[in-house]
């Protein structure tokens, strides 16, 4: 019962976002969250090292729970056709990849992260949970500063990459030139951005999303879930943790941005995507010991690349 509740709570809508907006914007004690602020880069270093350190500290893999609810939120991952391909960006310790691999035998998952430490944890967790996985492949990439390797967007390049990788070479480091010159065929059917974009510096987000667009097949879907405006975690940040408007740095040096629907919509449509779904997912939980309501807000979105 507890597992079913855990899987379902992220799929529910306990309150309207405008209800929380009214509370927050009329509370003077948290007004520092509402105003524009010049970014102070001295408070953090915008590179992958904080995430390397993060995954080293949480090497047990128990810090994140499996996101089983994603198969309810994104049923396309379960009903997809044979030989579908998915790119999971920011795979962390595999909390998104694992339920996808369990839920669909038709998907081949390519997972990347800016942290090589995270890729080690992902592989370890998958090997512990699933026997004989042959439809999972990982590589290191920071999509906010680097291009994805060509083989992601080209079937023939991908075949060559897989031959090199299965043969034990350093295929993950190779960026093959497209064998088809200007006419690259292929790409992935799905891209998942699950609590990843919020960790990218705001000024890098447009470039990162264009990278996602570049490796999707025509008609492919980008599936998005991330922190929403006025989420409980946003309101807990102290004023000195702000490094920009709705952008904060944690004590470990990692970033967290909180999206409103308009910001998310503009980022994706400016990159060429067509909006399919976009809404707040609002969940209320109660701290019975303290007698406090806790309001969680996430942004849920689906965006398609035009045919």
Image: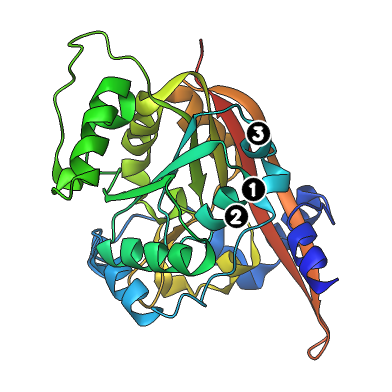
Q: Give me the C-alpha separation between circle 1 and circle 3.
A: 11 Å
Counting residues from the start of the chain, the first of labels 1 and 3 encountered is: 3
- In which quadrant will I find the N terminus? bottom right
Counting residues from the start of the chain, the first of labels 2 and 3 encountered is: 3
- Residue at figure coordinates x 52%, y 77% from the top left: 62
Image check: 132 left or right of 201?
A: right
| In the depicted structure, whether residue 111 falls above or below residue 25 | above
| In the depicted structure, whether residue 133 falls above or below residue 164 | below
For the image, the number of numbered tags is: 3
- Residue at figure coordinates x 17%, y 11% from the top left: 181
Q: Is residue 27 visible?
A: yes
Please name whichever residue, 163 or 278, is drawn nearer the observer in this view of the structure.
163
Residue ID for mark 2:
99
Residue ID for mark 3:
76
SS for callout 1: helix
Please name whichever residue, 139 or 281, is drawn nearer the observer in this view of the structure.
139
Q: Give me the C-alpha separation between circle 1 and circle 2.
A: 6 Å
- Residue at figure coordinates x 44%, y 20% from the top left: 217
The reply to whether callout 1 and callout 2 are in contact (CB within 8 Å) is yes
Residue ID for mark 1:
103
- Residue at figure coordinates x 17%, y 50% from the top left: 168
**Residue 252: image location, x then y, percent:** 35, 76
The reply to whether callout 1 and callout 3 are in contact (CB within 8 Å) is no
Mark 1, mark 3: which one is toward the viewer?
A: 1
Image check: 46 left or right of 68?
A: left
């Amino acid at each position: 019962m507890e597992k079913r509740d855990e899987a379902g709570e992220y799929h529910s809508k306990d309150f309207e976002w405008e209800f929380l907006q009214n509370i927050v914007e009329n509370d003077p004690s948290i007004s520092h969250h509402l105003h524009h602020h010049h970014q102070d880069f001295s408070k953090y270093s915008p590179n992958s090292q904080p995430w390397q350190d993060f995954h080293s500290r949480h090497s047990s893999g128990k810090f994140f729970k499996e996101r089983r609810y994603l198969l309810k939120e994104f049923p396309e991952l379960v009903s997809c056709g044979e030989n579908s391909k998915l790119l999971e960006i920011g795979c962390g310790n595999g909390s998104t990849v694992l339920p996808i691999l369990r839920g669909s035998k038709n998907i081949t998952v390519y997972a990347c992260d800016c942290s090589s430490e995270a890729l080690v944890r992902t592989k370890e967790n998958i090997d512990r949970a699933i026997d004989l996985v042959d439809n999972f492949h990982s590589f290191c990439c920071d999509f906010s500063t680097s291009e994805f390797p060509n083989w992601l967007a080209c079937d023939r390049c991908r075949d060559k990459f897989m031959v090199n990788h299965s043969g034990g070479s350093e295929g993950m480091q190779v960026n093959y030139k497209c064998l088809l010159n200007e006419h690259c065929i292929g790409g992935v059917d799905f891209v998942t951005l699950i609590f990843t974009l919020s960790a990218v510096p705001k000024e890098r987000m447009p470039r990162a999303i264009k990278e996602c667009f570049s490796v999707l097949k025509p008609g492919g879907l980008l599936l998005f879930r991330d922190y929403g405006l006025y989420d409980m975690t946003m309101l807990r940040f102290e004023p000195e943790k702000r490094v920009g408007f709705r952008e904060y740095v944690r004590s470990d040096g990692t970033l967290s941005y909180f999206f409103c629907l308009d910001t998310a919509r503009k980022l994706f449509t400016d990159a060429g995507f067509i909006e399919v779904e976009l809404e707040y997912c609002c969940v209320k939980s109660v701290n019975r010991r303290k007698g406090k309501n806790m309001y969680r807000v996430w942004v849920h979105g689906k965006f398609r690349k035009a045919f």
